[in-house]
Image: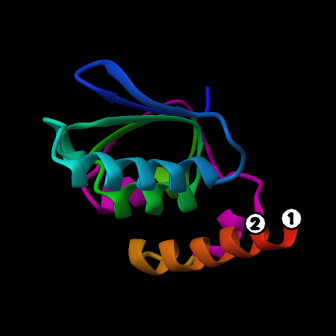
Amino acid sequence: MGVQIFCNEKLIFEDNGKWLHPLFKVDTFLKTELSTKKTPFQVEDLFLKDTVIGKAAALMIIHMGFRKCHGNLMSRLAKNTFEDFGVESTSDELIEAIECRTEVLLANINSPAEAWRMLKERADKAVKNSG
């Protein structure tokens, strides 16, 4: 499934990439759509679904301004982060932690902006090193 964005139950974006790359694509999509002013929605009105949501994804989702989301699999750190920021979240399965270095890296970071900056640097470095 990957990441999906819905507006009034209509699918408006989907990406099946790996790691957190689809969320960076969501950000680009939102900036493009909202800057053209052709769309009748605000980010707060959208619903995001993702296959796996750990704390890193949670902080990114909050940073982009989403207020509602669902994860097939969600870590307790992500759930607590959503609760701390007043974001409505649901999951099919709630687990203690995602076994991922990114979850550990952000365990003590609670700023969506700081997390975004760190993750963007890692993503940019990964793209640069792969090409």
Q: Which disc is residue 127 wearing?
A: 2
Amino acid type at circle 2 is: Val
Q: Nearer the viewer, residue 44 or 21?
A: 21
> Coloring scheme of the render?
rainbow
Q: Is residue 97 magenta?
A: yes
| Element carrying mark 1 | helix
Q: Nearer the viewer, residue 40 or 117?
A: 40
State which quarter of the image contains the C terminus: bottom right
* Residue 23 picture location, percent across and down: 52, 51
* Residue 52 picture location, percent across and down: 61, 40
> Crowding near pointer 2: few (<14 within 10 Å), some, many (20+)?
few
Residue 80 seen in the figure: no
Q: CA distance from mark 2 to mark 1?
A: 5 Å
Q: Nearer the viewer, residue 51 or 46?
A: 46
* Residue 16 picture location, percent across and down: 65, 34
- Magenta-highlighted residues: 81-107
Residue 100 lies left or right of residue 36; in this view the side is right
Q: Where is 105 relative to 1, above or below?
A: below
State which quadrant residue 108 falls in: bottom right
Amino acid type at circle 1 is: Ser
Q: Where is 85 relative to 46, above or below?
A: below
Q: Which disc is residue 130 wearing?
A: 1
Q: Nearer the viewer, residue 50 or 131?
A: 131
